[in-house]
Image (cartoon, rainbow, N blue to C red):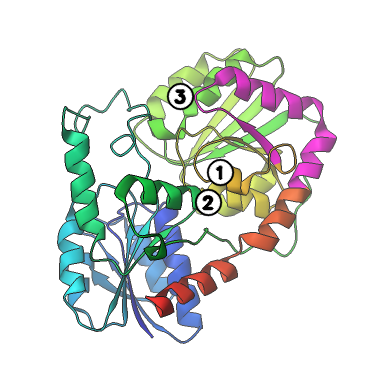
Amino acid sequence: MRIVLATPAAEAGGVWKHVLDLAAGFQQRGHQVTVALPPGAEPRMTEAADRLGLRAAPLQESRSLQADVWHLHLPKSLEWGALKWMAGARRVRGRATIVTEHLPRVPATDPTLPWDPGVVLGRAKPGAALAKTALKKAMLLPADRVIAVSEHSRRFLLSRYGLRPERVVAVPNGVVPPEVVEPVPDPEGVLRVLSVGALHFRKGYDVLLDAAALSSGTWSVSVIGEGREMEAIRARAAELPRTSVDLLGWRPDAARAAEAAHVLCLPSRSEAMPYSVLEAMACGRAVVASAVDGVPELVEDGVTGLLVPPDDPSALAAALDRLDKDRAAVLEMGAAGRARLLSRFTLETMLESTLRVYESA
């Protein structure tokens, strides 16, 4: 099968990891794969494709490539260039056109979500919601199948855009778990909390730091990621009386970083199917996370971790303090999380499910 995996994502985040994992997995199965990237894509993205021996093409030219499947991966729901890309891709007779919605629920598509206070452009105006909904329907209309990375995202797409249920399929993200799980370091020492993701408002790092200020214990927080809120987070972290915060920037080994932590914390305001949680579960680590979107499909509350309401520093502080005081639970939840991942959220399962979508389109 000739497959084009296209994305407008210019940052080497979760969407790029997803595309790269699919491309490498399909190639190993004997398929001919091309990855299509936008102008200005981070050099480490093209370098990763080169290391795997993948064919690369500019996103704008990918519509004209000879392929059996043209698969567009949207990092954000309202990607207006997709209107043009989808229209051009659909004109090729005999080719399946697939769209994966990696984050369909954002403030622009769901007015119940809070806007980033630092963002002015793009905020909703009277009548804007109807116009955006109509444009989004037009964007998805040419797709033979729409993939959502969680069942929650699938339900949101169906209810928001009135798509036919048979056209929208949930295919959860998956990872390759390490064969050997490293033991939790210094199990009785200071609680080591890891958080991974772009330093943006949606990720809720302000909530994590506010929770640290309310904590009755002492934590050590490490943050892996880059973004526009770096300096604001650094300034807030310096004010914390008991919690040390290390801002580590981008790290190529982020997938295994949870091995150095007791707990992975995801304080996000919205998420579809976060890789940071999957990777922590694969390493056998407990997870404390916001109960948003697809996260409860990953984290079983009280079994593999703890779920808290989004934007609630008090609840987040209480959950982390609970695990700080109960290290046996940290170990038990970590083991249960790995078992859950091995049964439901592996890369092998994601690859096979995606290929079935292609074959049915």
Q: Is residue 190 above or below residue 213?
A: below
The residue wearing badge 2 is 275
Extent of the magenta region? 305-334
The tag earlier along the polypeptide, 2 or 3, is 3
* Image point (46%, 32%), residue name: 269
| Magenta span includes 5 | no
Q: CA distance from mark 2 to mark 3?
A: 24 Å
Q: Main secondary structure of the magenta part?
A: helix
Residue lying at 41% horizontally and 51% vertically, measured from the top left: 13
Residue behind mark 1 = 295
In this rendering, position of residue 202 left or right of residue 69: right
Q: Nearer the viewer, mark 3 or mark 1?
A: 1
Q: Nearer the viewer, residue 165 or 338?
A: 165
Quadrant position of residue 316: top right
What residue sits right under mark 3 in the picture?
A: 234
Q: Dot 1: within a 10 Å radius of its alpha carbon, few (fewer than 14), some, or many (20 or more) residues?
A: many
